[in-house]
Each structure stands twice: as structure tokens, then as C-alpha cells.
Amino acid sequence: MASFVHRIEVHYSHDPRLKTRTDRIRSLGFAVDELHLAEVYTIATASRDFTRDELMQIGSQLVNPVVQEFTVDAATKPLFDYAIEVGFLPGVTDNVGATARQMIEDFFSMKFADGEAVYSSQLYFVRGRPGAGALQGLAATLANPLVNRVLTKDRAGYGQAGMDRIVPYVELHELPTAETVDLDLDDAELARLGKEGIMDPQTHQRRGPLALDLAQLHAIRDYFLALGRKPTDVELESLAQTWSEHCKHTIFASAMDDDVPDGLYKTYIQAATNEIRQEAGDRDICVSVFSDNSGAIVFDDDYIVTHKVETHNSPSALDPFGGALTGIVGVNRDTIGFGLGAKPCINIYGFCVGNPDATVPLYRGKDTSNPVLSPRQILDGVVRGVGVGGNCSGIPTPQGFCYFDPRYAGKPLVFAGTVGVMPRVRGGRKLHEKAAHAGDLIVMVGGRVGKDGIHGATFSSEVLDHKSPVTAVQIGDPITQKKFSDVIVKEARDPGLYRSITDNGAGGLSCSVAEMAKECNGCRVQLDTVPLKYPGMAPWEIWISESQERMTLAVPPEQLAAFMDLMQRREVEATVIGKFTGSGRCIVECGGKTVMDIELKFLHDGLPKKHLKTTFTRKMHPEPDAPCPDRLDAALLVMLSRRNICSTEFISIQYDHTVQGGHVLGPVQGMGRVQGVASLTKVVPGSKKAVGLSQALFPSYSELDPYRMAGAGIDTAIRGLVAMGIPPSAIAILDNFCWCSSDEPERLGQLKLAAKGCYDFAKAFGTPFISGKDSMFNDFSGFDAEGMPVKVSVPPTLLVSSIGIHADAGKAVSMDAKIAGDLVYVIGETREELGGSEYFAMLGSVGNEVPALDAGAAKERYTRLAGAIAHGFVASAFPVSHGGLLVALARVAIAGRHGMDLTVPVPAGMRPDRYLFSESLGRFVVTVAPDHKRAFEQAIGSDAVLLGRVAGSRLRVTTKTLVLDAEIKELEKAYKAPFGGY
């Protein structure tokens, strides 16, 4: 415990963010006059005290002297009515505090002893009288009770002394031994064990979900019965992590019905890629697929690029900031852990959340306790988390999306992806190949191990409910990760100081070490040597903790001295925790005792096989009966302001997309700053080539036709890249399935159709899957405001991400209309396909007819368009997607701040509104300079239909009559209004 505690408070003399902060809180319904902020640093030491002069020196390092002041062991005294202090609970990662501690160590050339720390907190001063209930609500908005402590005082209680000095020190009393677990139980008790976890012998509380079903528990019991002993808690927890749905993807691996005996993954996803690669022959763009932390494709003769997209849904539901931050830095580590280490060079994101303006009273406790965070709190948190992860790591974030649906209110979907780049060969070694050897030392580098992240893998394999463990939430530390990322990729990799590497993600050491052990067939680990954040952790906690910023490496004994010296010079903590062997076993020791001894074959392949049964019932919905409006001006304004169409620039401007200097296109384009659907980034200095990224998802289609939904996602993700000039032959794709209630036959039937759609459309386009991930239980089970049980399931969601190599970034085109007089074309056929469309949703209907596509014909059309762009025939191109043709035309016009005068040939028998808002696939809006008209039309053929010209400052559309005549400024205003105050 600390003997000396000091408190430094930093406040603004002139706060440049006061208005923004106050306006944001007011927008959430809190009647405050002003909301001031002070940053607090609590310094707690035992080995030495700091003098008054030293504390003043520390304070001077923590402020910007132009606009800030500080106090030492004295209260800040502004004008206020209430003070609310928000800090972290004990054990929660405190990045600001850790940075302040390192600053003090560097400034005084000293080191804090174990147990000494700097703790950060934020002190809000409220001016105004919001009332007791509103004040409590404001505190709940500023803090998350799962990770934060909150102290509130009024002016009288604050007095002269100010806030209390609080040291959130971790005190544990765990037994440093492994306990045996009795599996000789009836099935009811075994099922409870799998759902709620092992009973702790000290607290008599369940430890948290193992996510093991009865068949799996029976297999484990039989294995240890044959050995003549009971499993330890370390062994059972390790098997639970390794066998979790999160890690083993059991649903995609299981036989399904009678026609998919090898499972969805092998039958549809892997098979599509294998067949595409075989047909491509020497033109195969794939380097590594499905076998490493990321997938990889050819960039040029000297370099490859990697891509991986992960989900971090369950943690983000509990702590949106920490969950999203951990998601993005975690997928950064997937890049560092690809092959012998790729350099992260691009981040992407995706957020599926509920309506941020709606209040959804959901609770995890029956007595309206443990409320679910509001969609607005979740959105704000995940946006900030991804931003901190990317910005602090020096990785550009040019690409991403938001999608809104009330069914994401119980559990959001948070996607995080990273692209990496690496040389093909260095020192005679292919850098995408790796293998640990027996005798190599197991070295853990990066952060220390704590209780944060325990049961993360098993937690994400379960439905979110009142038993969801707080320890499953982590907060990442991008600064620590940046240090070891640079030293590994830039200094340790090329000299061959290690043979293999992977990240400590789901399951922590239990998965990273055991996975690498497959490369040499064995490992032996000494848990006593693992560096901890604080003493008192039990062996099982150390083994499965998912504390962030850690990598596991296989270091040859002869390279250990050089490796450890390099890590020490770069201030990266590295520890030898064991050795890789050829024993065929995973052996873990702690306190001189063996706490785990399991055959690798059983650990990785002992999972019992399942045979799943599916059903699928196509449901019909009433078609909307609203008449066709004579004019579509009002309808277009409403459509542009729909949250799945409107601008989300408020996110884009928070993320640095130009760092590393490779920015070409995205995230907003044109003078009108319209959200692009694709980005283009240079990743190899001096090369004219660039990496294109796009993505697509259509959750509103999934309940109507999951097969066509998959096709829509693949087609739209590909079209985003084609519109910049990348041909289908240079594109690869990734799949992220986020399903719900995946133990129900009907949901599995939807999943099966979607996977079949992935196979058919990927094969037709010739675009291989190189990586993927599935998250199968995105449901919330809890209670409503009346205490009644409620289940909220996300719509079955498939995110398709695309990556492609542009041969010459200088020839890429953006989406914005360029010059008055340019010709406006639509490429592709429009049919009456509005089932699940934004237009029908605006009308309060669902509809039935989901867009279909002849992918083979579309591929030929896309190849011709990419060729036309390469020859300079195209001024701008944009894929038609959510909202249909009229929305796409409006976005192109807004981006260029140019009007258009168009005549649209609506087929006989089709209503103009349904033609213009149809979401038919395979289409582009293209503008072409008049000088290139003939060459463009010869290149594209009859698929291109001339609609009119770029002209004036209004968007005018005529069918048989004038249906739209709107000022571009008014369209832009509607497009940017929904998130204008965020």
C-alpha cells in the first residue's frame, strides 16, 4: 500500500473545449449552464516521497502553460454548483496514468517500485441546477459503472478541501494453487458448470462462463477418467478457451443437415477460395489464406499486403470505449503476428448500433438494476475507442461505416480491421512463413498480466445477460503496443532473432502458446515467471487472462541475449516463460507443481463433432400501399437524412487518415465532403501502386432472403473498389458473420443460405476469401422497464470487406462530379427490387423482393469499367447502393457541389419513385468529359445509359414529367443534418 499520496489537478485558465463539451451534454437532455473539466493525477508511492519542489516540477510537465494551470495537494476552485469525479476502478487499465508515471520516471531518472503508480481521473464542474435525478443521470453518462468509480459533491461538500484522495489499489487474496474440479456430476449440474463456470472454493461464487455444452463436458470427463484423475481448474479453463465458439468456430465447422457433411466453412468459404485459386493458376493473387492471423495477397514482386477484420461485440456492449479500443489494437496485433511480422499500415472500422436518439430501457437485472448502456453512449464510446487506438498507434483510419437498426440496442456489432505490409523475402527467408522449433524459448513481450480480459473468449461465445463477467472487459494500451510493434517489425524480424510469433488475444497465453506449440508438437510453461500487474492472481487466471499488448515469440537459445538486449534498449518488457518441446503435450507448472498436462491432440482436436439441423421458412410481408408522389423533392430530403445514408463525417474527422503519408482517396470526398464507400492508400514508398479498401452489409435483407443478402454484400464491396479503377481480378474479400440465436434451426437455416450465397457469388466474381471471422450469439437476454423478460437479437449480419491493388494510384477517380458540362451515365440495369430497402423502411414497410444479380455478366461489366478508368475516360464513379439511384446521384452532386439536369428512362409499368429508389445491384453513377464520350461508350457498351449533364446548382430529374428540382445546398443540408451536433 502507498505511504505517500499526492494529488495534482490540471485545469484550463481558458478552456477551448468548454462550449463543445457543454453543447454535447445539453444535446443529451441535461440542463447545465457550463461543464468545466479538470484532469487529476494521483501519485501513490511507498519507497520514496516527492518534495514540494518536485511535485511542482511534475505539475509543470503535465500542463500546457499557455491555457492551463495546476494545483498541488490543493483543490481547484472554479465557480460551480456540483463536482463529479470519474476515475477507474482498481485493476482497470489506466493509460493516461501509465503515461504520466513514465514521464515522471524519465524526468527524474528513477523508477517506481512495484505497487507504486500514478492514477488519472477526470473532475467535472457543473454550473447550473439540473436536479438530483438529472445529476445522477449526468454522472451515469460521464462514467461506466463497470470500469469507473464516481464521486459527486455539491458546493458545500466540496468546501476548501475539494475531492477525496482515492488510490484504486488492487488487493487480491487468491490461492496461488490450482484446484481440482469434480466432473462426476449429473447432466443438470454439468450444464450449469458449462454455463456459469467453476465454483470458487473461497468465495463460493461461480467464476464465469466456460461456454462448454454437455457433449464437450462428457468428452473432457471421459479423457480424465482414462487418465485416472480429475482435471485441474487450469486444464478445464484452458480447454474451455481452446474449444470456445470464438476460437474453434464450431458452428461453421460442424456437419449441417445431409447435404453439408463437411461444415459451412469447408464446403462454401474455403472451397470457393481453393477453386478460385486453382482456376487462376499463375494469376493467383493469394499468398496466405485461413492459416495465419491475417490473410495475405500479392502487392508487387517485392511486397505482400495482409488484411484481417475482427469483431468485439460483447465487450463493447459492456464498455464501448474499452471494447472498441481493444478491438482495434487487437487486430493490429493480428497483423504484427502474421508470418514473422507485418507492419500495420491501415485501420478500418464498422459500427452497428441502435438509434442514438432513442432511449431503450433494457436491464440485466430483474429489478431494473444493471441498465444496458444507451445506443448514444455506445456510439460515442466505440467511436472514441477506435480513434484512440489508431491515432495513438500512428496508423491511418481512412475507411469505415455506421449502420443503425433498433435490433442492435441490446448488443452492438463492432468491427475492427487492419491492413499490413511486409517484404516477401529478407535474409533468404520467406517472411510469411514461420515455425517454432523444439528447444526454442517461449518469450512474452509487451504488457503485464492482470484480471482484465478473463473469460473473454468464452464470454463472447455466449448470450449477453446478467451473468456477463466484468473481468471480460479490457482497455488497450496503444502506446505500449506501438513500442513493441516497431521494435519487432523494424529491428528484430529481419536479423532472424525469433522463429515464430503470434498475439495474445482470445484465451491469452493458453491459446497463443498452445497454438504455437502445434508447430513443434509440445511446450512447457512456468507460470511463476509471467510478469503480473499485481500480486495474488491464481494460476488459471494468469493462464487465460486476455490482458492486452502482449505477443508470444519463439526465440532460439542462441539469439536470446541479442533479443533481450534489444527489448531492454527499447524499453519493451520481455520475459522467458518456458520452452517449446517435442513432447506432444502442453505442460504448465506453477509453484513447483504441474497444474496442466494435456496432450496437444486432445487439446486441439478432442472437440466432439456436432451434426446440426436447419429449417428455413420464407416469410411474406405486405407491400407498402402509399401512392407514388407527383414530385420526389420531399422524399429525397428525407432519404438523405436517414441515418444509414446520411453523412457520418463527425467520425471521419476524429480519425487521422493521412498519417504515414499514403493517403490518396477517402474517407470524405469532393468539395461537398461526402462519405465515400472506398478508400485508396499507398503503403510502399516510391511505388505507384496503392491498396483499395471497401465493405458492405445489408442486414435489412437477411430476414427476407439471406442468399441474396450475401450476394448484395459481395457485389457492393467489389463495386466500391471497381469505382476507383481496380478490376475484379485484383480483388480479394473477407467475411464476418455476426449471427444470433445460432442454436435455433431457423437461424441456422438462414446462415446456411448466406454461406451458400458467399460460395456462389465469390466464385462468379473470381474473388477469393482470404480471411474471416464469425460471431454466433449476438443476443441480449434481460428485462424491460416492467421487469418482464425480453430477448433482443441482432438481425443476421454479414459484413463483406474487400481489398484490392490499384495498379496506378494516379489514375484513380473519386466520386464527386467534377466539371459543368460533363455527361452523367448510369451503368447497369434497374429493376423493381425494394424488399428491405431504405425507401420502403421510410414508408414503414419491409417488402419482399430483395435485389438479385447475374454476377457473371456483372464481372464483365466491372472489368470494362475499370479499364475505362485506367484509360482516363472517366471523371468520377460511384456505386449505387443503399437508397438507390436517386440517392447516389444526389451524393455525387453534393460531393462536387454541382447540379445536374437529367432525364431518366423509367420503364413502362414501373413507378418513378420505385425506379429511382430501387436498390438493384451492379450499378454505378459515372460522369464523363464530353471529349471522352465516344471512347467511354465503346468501352462500356450498351450497359451505359446517358442521363444528362452536370449543370447549374440544382438537381433536376425528369421521367415523363419533372419529378425533382432541388437546390444542391438544400440536399447537402439534409445529408449532413442528422449528426451535425455530434
Image: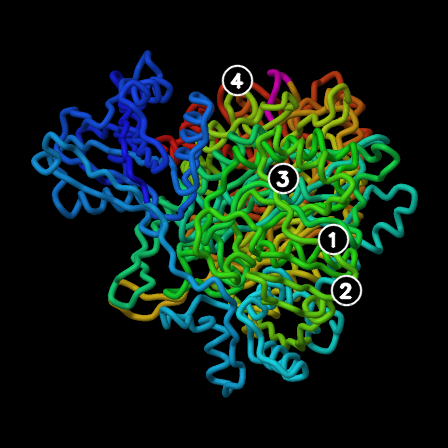
Considering only order in the chain, which callout, 3 or 1, is on the residue closer to the N terminus?
Answer: 1
Considering only order in the chain, which callout, 3 or 2, is on the residue closer to the N terminus?
Answer: 3
Between the residue at mark 4 and the residue at mark 1, the CA separation in whole angstroms equals 51 Å
* Label of residue 583 in the image: 2
Image quarter for residue 328?
top right
Q: Give the residue number, with chain letter if any, for mark 4.
A: 952
* Amino acid, disc 4: Gly
Count of marks overlaid on the render: 4
Q: Position of residue 368 (x, y in %)?
A: 25, 62
Which marked residue is nearer to the observer: mark 4 or mark 3?
3
- The span picked out in magenta is 815-821
Query: 10 Å neighbourhood of mark 2: few (<14), some, or many (≥20)?
Result: some
Image quarter for residue 296?
top right
Between the residue at mark 1 and the residue at mark 3, the CA separation in whole angstroms equals 16 Å
Q: Give the residue number, with chain letter if any, for mark 1.
A: 290
Which marked residue is nearer to the observer: mark 2 or mark 1?
2
Between the residue at mark 2 and the residue at mark 3, the CA separation in whole angstroms equals 36 Å
Whether tag 2 and tag 1 are in contact, CB under 8 A, the answer is: no
**Residue 495 visible:** yes
Which marked residue is nearer to the observer: mark 4 or mark 1?
1
Instruction: Identify the residue at image location x=73%, y=78%.
Output: 258
Considering only order in the chain, which callout, 3 or 4, is on the residue closer to the N terminus?
Answer: 3
Label 1 SS? loop
Q: Nearer the viewer, residue 804 or 239?
A: 239
Look at the magenta stretch and give its main secondary structure.
loop
Whether tag 2 and tag 3 are in contact, CB under 8 A, the answer is: no
Label 2 SS? loop
